[in-house]
Amino acid sequence: MRIPLDKESPTPLYAQIRDYLRASILAGTLPPKTRLPAARQLAADLGVSRVTVESAYADLEAEGLIVRRTGSGSYVSPQAVPAPARQKGEVDWPLWQKELAGAGDLADPDDLDGAGVSLDPGLERGHPAGRPHGAKRPPGFISFTGFGDPRQFRIEDFYAALREVVRRDRVACLEMEDERGYPPLRQSIAHILTSQGIETRPDRVLITSGSQQALAIVTQLLLKPGDTVLVETPTYDWALRLFRAHRLRIVGCPIDAQGMQVEALEPLLQQYHPRLIYTMPTFQNPTGACMSGHRRRLLLELADRYNVPILEDDFAGDLRYEGVAQPALKALDPGGRVIYAGTFSKLLMPGLRLGFVVADGPVYRRLVEIKRVNDLAAGSLIQRALEVYVTVGRYHAHLRRLIHAYRRRRDRLMHGLAEEFPPGWEAAPPQGGLFLWLRLPPGVTATGLAPLARARGVDYAPGTRFFPAPDEGEAYIRLNFAAVPPDEIDEGVRRLGQAVRDALEIRA
Ligand code: PMP
């Protein structure tokens, strides 16, 4: 144990030790029943006499904070109750911290991916970005936010893969991995992509911590504060937050059922000179729109003419329920125009935190460098386990299972909306992906509806979150149907329909 002691201080050393331990016990950092070091050991560690430590322990025992058992040692008392956490305002933060506190939040104060339902205020209050991803909603609460459905993942197979890797590779699976990612995994990714029309090689694939890191390293490499990034409006909320964190100017190009309105792009390119175009051509988040083949080609042509790199975020392109498969922009890339970001999160498990970039030309090497300065390399064990798990055949089998399940959920949601919602809403069933983008009946706003929906035990992602400008998107909500089991979809839509009626009634 390392206790900071000030030998020059007028406070005796035993009192300094006592005060430090008391504060740790009351703060809960030394929880009840924690074994304290033996007095002789602590004295040796701190360079003080054993009597000094004994005196500190004796005081704490007298205060009821520790118990001493002869022959077994000293423990934090099971009855020691941590004091309530100090409120932020009580600490006199240094000026640079105060300045940070005054800066705008990147995340909504009470949310990461939900509509801000407050479930465990104690847990959320201290969390750096609102509700932590793992936060549970109360029993019976139905959430149309979030990711894919982890219940579709064959955890036993993954467990077997983990065991196999540890048995096969021994400590090699705990050593630092190749900074570009575990080579056989890059090989598998190249195979999977090639089977989907994106011809690539392992030496053009870089494994990242989720595709979010792919977006982050591309941003770090290509843009500096004040530069312009061009996005679809609406667009993926955490990309917007990333761009804001980099202090970029965000310019939006509107989207319709055929994806980004590429016909409107040229004047924007001329006026704003963006350094990057960020797009999700296939089953866009949040609208579910899929860019037409014509627009894909036009986008590539314009980006080439204006010398702007394209970042293609293909987070759910494989989850197609109907319609014709459109080639990825990367598949149409004559070479080095498109940086492609993919992920295993939507198909497998978001908690694996494994995604990848595919890039060719000098940019590849630079991206590897940026990834490396950020976190040296992706975790070895998890990459190896994924490589064993994700054979091309298994990937496609898993994909077929998901498509079957999610298509039914989408249809169930559409059916539920038709049955349960008051008239005036609009939504086109997406041909793939995870989301339904719903226009609320006139007069109902996403922000106004949120507390009413929560009160009825359901939530969604409000449209406002997906626009660069804070005053846009009130007419929309995004519903994730993929993560919700079918019977909960029925009940969730019923509750949401009631909440919409509540909102209309309040207005009337
Ligand atoms: N892109 C899009 C469009 C997303 O929706 C997400 C996750 N919500 C990501 C990227 C990042 O996902 P991950 O880091 O888990 O791969």
Image (spheres, rainbow, N blue to C red):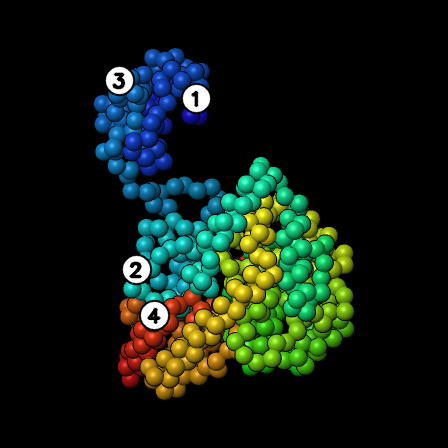
Q: CA distance from mark 4 to mark 3?
A: 57 Å
- Left or right of 23 in this view: 160: right
Q: Earlier in the sequence, mark 2 or mark 3?
A: 3
**Which numbered mark, 4 or 2, is in the foreground of this view?**
4
| Badge 2 residue CB within 8 Å of ligand 1 | no
Q: Of circles 2 and 1, which is in front?
A: 2
The residue singled out by tag 3 in the image is 70
Residue at 22% x, 23% y: name it.
62
Can you tell which quarter of the image residue 70 is in? top left
Near mark 4 (Cα within 10 A), the count class, few <14, some 14-19 or many ≥20, is some
Q: Position of residue 101 (x, y in %)?
A: 46, 51
Q: Which residue is mark 2?
A: 138
Q: Nearer the viewer, mark 4 or mark 3?
A: 4
| Near-viewer residue (165 or 437) | 165
Do tag 4 and tag 1 residues touch (Cβ < 8 Å)? no
**Residue at image point 41% right, 63% down:** 114
Residue 488 visible in rendering: yes
Answer with mark 4 or mark 2, whichever residue precedes in sequence.
2
Three-letter residue code for mark 2: Pro
Please state which amino acid type lies under the numbered disc 1.
Asp
Helix, strand or loop under label 1: loop
Q: Nearer the viewer, residue 453 or 341?
A: 341
Looking at marks 3 and 1 on the same chain, the residue that comes earlier in the sequence is marked by 1
Q: Is residue 186 above or below residue 380?
A: below
Marks 3, 1: nearer the viewer? 3
Residue displayed at 41% across by 54% down:
134
Residue pictured at 48% horizontal, 49% vertical: 159
Q: Earlier in the sequence, mark 4 or mark 3?
A: 3
Per the image, the residue denoted by label 4 is 488
What residue is disc 1 on? 6
Q: Nearer the viewer, residue 277 or 259?
A: 259
